[in-house]
Image: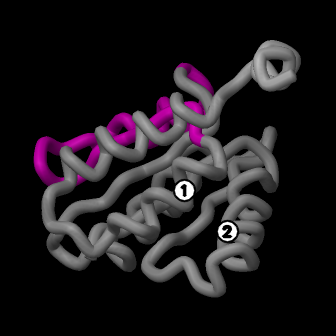
Amino acid sequence: MIGGIIVSHGKLAEELLNVLTIILGEAPNIEAISIGWYDDVEESKKKISRSLKRVDQKNGVIIFTDMFGGTPSNLSFSFLQDNEVEIITGFNLPMLIKFVSLQRSKNLKEVAKKVVEQGKKNIHLASALLKSKR
């Protein structure tokens, strides 16, 4: 099973994991790490490292971060490893739902690609979408 870690500014990661669990009933092998504005950088890296060890079942881990270039992403980049750790920035709820549906796969790169596709597919300008349906 591919592990997942959601890393975000503030409590976003924890709340998104809560919502994911409510929708799906369970979100196995996924952890949330919230990075506060004044958290120590090295301590935050240690949190990510410990979480990686807990969720890694030898099929790889995807780290989801809220924003490319933000502290959660920048800290996570140091753990990027080919065929072991992928990082997806700018996550949304449909991506996480897709991830849970695919996490029993053993192909980390393929799962990461499909999750990114799902995220892009679920971003819409509602006014344009609804206007075309009228």
Question: Which residue does the image show at 43% across and 59% down from the upper left?
Answer: 99
Q: In the picture, which quadrant includes the C terminus?
A: top right
**Nearer to us in this view, 52 or 121:** 121
53 in relation to 38, above or below: below
Compared across the picture, whether 87 is left or right of 68 comes to left
29 in relation to 59, above or below: below
| Residue 38 shown in magenta | no
Q: In the picture, which quadrant includes the N terminus?
A: bottom left
* Quadrant position of residue 65: top right
Q: Amino acid at mark 1?
A: Leu
Compared across the picture, whether 125 is left or right of 105 comes to right
The residue range painted magenta reads: 69-91
**In this orientation, does residue 79 appear?**
no
Residue under numbered circle 2: 20
Picture coordinates of residue 80, whole percent (x, y): 27, 41
Question: Which residue does the image show at 69% across and 56% down from the upper left?
Answer: 13
Number of marks: 2
**Nearer to us in this view, 7 or 93:** 93
58 in relation to 108, above or below: below
Dot 1 crowding, Cα within 10 Å, few <14, some 14–19, many 20+? many
* Quadrant position of residue 37: top right
Question: Which residue does the image show at 75% across and 72% down from the upper left?
Answer: 18
Residue under numbered circle 1: 96
Residue at the extreme bottom: 25
Picture coordinates of residue 16, whole percent (x, y): 72, 59
Picture coordinates of residue 98, whole percent (x, y): 47, 57
Could you tell me if the residues under marks 2 and 1 are in contact, i.e. CB atoms within 8 Å? yes
Compared across the picture, whether 101 is left or right of 96 comes to left
108 in relation to 50, above or below: above
